[in-house]
Image: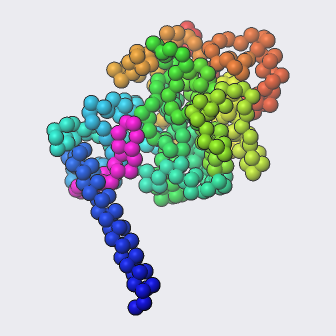
Amino acid sequence: MNSMEAKTKKRSLLDEEKFYEGKRSKQDDWKLVQKKYGDGVAWSRGAMIGKGSFGCVFLANLKKPKSKYSSYPPIMAVKSAEVSASSSIQKEKEVMDNIRGCPNVIKCFGDEITNREDGQMVYNLLLEYGSGGTLADLIKKSGTKGLPEMEARRYTRSILLGLTHIHKKGYVHCDLKPENILLINNSSDGFTAKIGDLGLTKRAKQSKKNKLGPYWRGTPMYLSPEAVIDGVQEPPSDVWAVGCIVFEMLTGKPLWFSEKDLTVDEILSRISDENELPCYSSSISTDGRSFLKGCLSRKVMCRLTTNMLLDHPFVKGLFEDNVNEVDKLQEEVLDINAITSSPSFSDDDDGSSDDDGELWWSSCSDGSSYGLSSWSEEDVDTIENEESTRFREVQKYPVTLTVSKGI
């Protein structure tokens, strides 16, 4: 063996040793985490798969799948935080209880308190596990090309079905983005997209008490103009975020993509600038561009609703909906006033609206203003002149509004 071969062999042994040291280090870290957060009665904590300001997310496996706890799936995702810092996760549990029953929203299997070695209590939220990762992971794998349009259309329809249910239950998600869309294995056609991470969800038509200036929740890149300018986040804001997600699926790039890294202030400035308009790639189909225009209208009244978007050619007719399930979901819809209040939604966070007679949509007459107001004849003339194209899109998908007595 010459000196060159000896050096190569030595380097190989060193690399192999480093690999196993790294593997042992990760295993040691997992053991430390398991000790820190503890196991559940029926499940064992596995590897950490996510981390955020709320806490950490772990894989969890059932200890005895055939026991009386077998109603749990074999693998779950467990979102955990110390009880003293778990208000966000507990609020998410409450929201998920109120909107349960939709196959396009991540399932919640309950919650549980575990104990650390030092006696501290840990709050755990047991959730459906997305074995396919997130939509963000899938887009990243596609490079800068984006997903095939048919695949993007399927995921878009799934997202819209979940979001329609959330809105009907009287909530606004406020943080829709590819990272919060999980892909669940579906034996029939690959993966189904499901909406997850409802920690920032709010009730619709809540006023912002004790807030100085515009206030918004969520991720800057996916915020709507009215959220940035006036701090208004209602169902149309989620629709804007859907448009951002679809744009990203089709192009592989965020809506406000720039070659240089943008600061938060720069992103918010572009969103609030009424002269900044999205550029649609020629590779996107006519139906795709029409769909995006219906989502990404700066003027809220020109933005389509989720029901209207579900009837859009871009997503309509991809597969047959379960009619019985859709009817059941519609029957379960509760009036927002009938949903019981909770300490999780305090006045300091977002109190109930001071004027239940106001509609959640905004005036379309002024692109720089999103305050709640009524239309004048001049507004209508302005709309017809400036937004005739978008209104033709809206007219294709008429919607019937039922106004309650007293509004």
Q: Quadrant of residue 344?
A: top left
Q: Is residue 324 magenta?
A: no
Q: Whole-percent x and y of residue 180? A: 49, 42
57 left or right, relative to 211: left
Residue furthest toward the bottom? 1
Q: How is the image coloured?
A: rainbow
Q: Is residue 49 magenta?
A: yes
Q: Quadrant of the N terminus?
A: bottom left
How many numbered marks have been drawn onto this rendered protein structure? 0
- Residue 344 position (above or below residue 141): above
- Residue 188 position (above or below residue 403): below
Provide the residue span drawn in magenta: 46-66
242 left or right, relative to 74: right
Q: Specify the principal SS of the magenta part.
A: strand
Q: Nearer the viewer, residue 86 or 185?
A: 86
The answer to whether residue 101 is visible is: no
Q: Whole-percent x and y of residue 329? A: 48, 35
Q: Residue at x 63, y 50 (%)?
A: 252
Q: Quadrant of residue 342?
A: top left
Q: Nearer the viewer, residue 400 or 123?
A: 123
Q: Residue at x 39, y 36 (%)?
A: 53
Q: Whole-percent x and y of residue 150? A: 65, 53
The answer to whether residue 334 is visible is: yes
Q: Residue at x 55, y 8 (%)?
A: 406
